[in-house]
Amino acid sequence: MKHILMVDDVTTNLKSAAEVLQPFYHLSMAKSGKQALNFLKKNRPDLILLDIMMPEMDGYETMEQIKLNPRTANIPIIFLTADTERESEIRGMKMGAMDFITKPFESEAMLGRIEKVLQMEDMRRNILSSAKKDLLTDLWKPEYLEPEIDSQLKHISDSGATFLLVDFDDFREVAANAHSSNADGIIIRFAESLKTLAPTESVLGRIGRDRFLVFIPYGLNEIELLGLCNDIRDIAIKEANLASSADETLTASIAITLAPQHGTDYDTLLRKLDMAMYYIKQTGKDQIHVYRGV
């Protein structure tokens, strides 16, 4: 079910919209621009319905802040307005609004405009995804990871961000003893498991035959981080082994860097991930290691 955030300072407007939208969409509500921006720090809806006339921070100001953040900049926005002036519509469209819905709401027109915008957004995402994603795994290609992650690092919250490098141990030997299609099957099954295990809003990439990046745009506590790493090693590797016809059992090592403690850009954090992974490979493999300057 698609997720819509509605922002309106008038309670009766929120209630009337909820009656129309809740049977079809997961609906979240905010009563001010500030509330909406706080909500967006931890949530990414598929669409924002944004009232123009609000006190303190109006819809235009709220939209400017949304567009400045790379994590939220591409969320489609429909303005809600009782203003029928052409100038308001022109201003909104120039700022990037996808459409307008006038108040009071007419249910069929409202649903139709929302469905049209969501369909357009799905098409846009599919086109972008096909260019940026690895054909075998549907994970981000290496050349697109750096600009995407660097843009997100500029807007991380006080909790920081988490970066994992997952590397199969001795994959070359296992793949050499497996049929080529089975070797690809190992990669595919692992990638599918990784998608289900990774936290919300993670950026997942494949940067080598058997090397995977997980970027989480917020910090995890020690228990959460250890739990995620153990899940990746235990569950995902079991899935990968189901696709292998080789006698060897695959294991995986995981290196970890944290932002901003270990760096504030993709290149620095990746370099330190490689250093942490080198340490693992020299000390026995099949381990989890946080970068500590070694």
Image: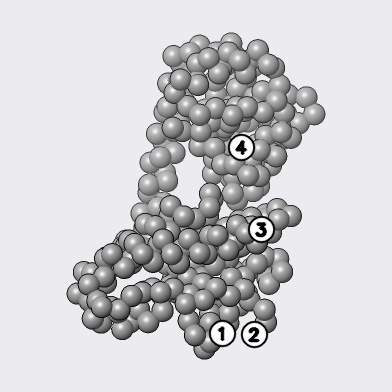
Q: CA distance from mark 2 to mark 1?
A: 7 Å
Q: Earlier in the sequence, mark 3 or mark 1?
A: 3
Direction bottom: furthest residue: 282
Q: Of label 4 and label 2, which has the lower sequence position?
A: 4
**Nearer mark to the viewer, of 4 and 2:** 2
Q: Position of residue 79 (x, y in %)?
A: 59, 26
Instruction: Say the numbered circle drawn on residue 294.
Output: 2
| Residue at the spot 46% in from the left edge and 63% down from the top edge | 232
Q: Quadrant of the C terminus?
A: bottom right
Residue 173 lies left or right of residue 94; in this view the side is left
Residue at the (55%, 18%) spot, across then down: 18
What's the CA distance linking mark 3 and mark 4?
Answer: 38 Å
Classify the position of the N terminus by image quarter: top left
Numbered mark located on residue 94 in the image: none
Q: The residue tagged with tag 3: helix, strand or loop?
A: loop
Amino acid type of disc 3? Asn
